[in-house]
Image (spheres, rainbow, N blue to C red):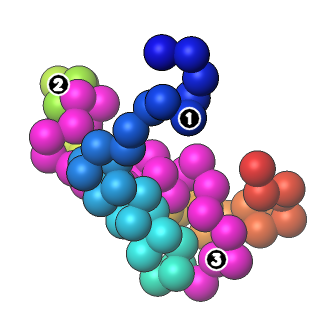
Amino acid sequence: MDSTADLKMTPRYVEVSEAAHRIAEELGHSHVGVEHVFLAIIRDDSAIPSQLIERHMRRDTLEQEVLELMASKGYQGKRPD
């Protein structure tokens, strides 16, 4: 493999990407950031990160904490990466 152009997107990658876009839209955000991707991943029961998180805490609790942080006063003022 000589470049990233040779890499193929898997169907699960596309699903998570689309879910991240939906999450951003549902939250009324004008960007899709890593936090939206993170939420999309932890909502995917098959994702390794969500399985690892589940060993240590409930994913719905983590999701709620992420959403609360995103709703906090400083979130929208930060530069979207």
Image: magenta residue range: 28-50
Residue at 59% over, 23% down: 3
Occupied quadrant, residue 40: bottom left
Circle 3: residue type: His
Q: Is residue 54 rendered magenta in the image?
A: no
Going from N to C along the chain, the mark reached first, 3 or 1, is: 1
Q: How far apart are marks 2 and 1 (CA)?
A: 36 Å
Q: How many residues crowd mark 1 within 10 Å: few (<14), some (14–19), many (20+)?
A: few
Across and down, in percent, residue 67 comes to 49, 62
Residue at 23% over, 28% down: 48
CB of mark 3 within 8 Å of CB of mark 1?
Answer: no
Circle 1: residue type: Ala
Per the image, the residue denoted by label 1 is: 5
Per the image, the residue denoted by label 2 is: 55
Across and down, in percent, residue 41 comes to 34, 46
Q: How far apart are marks 3 and 1 (CA)?
A: 30 Å
Across and down, in percent, residue 23 comes to 44, 71
Q: What element carries label 3?
A: loop
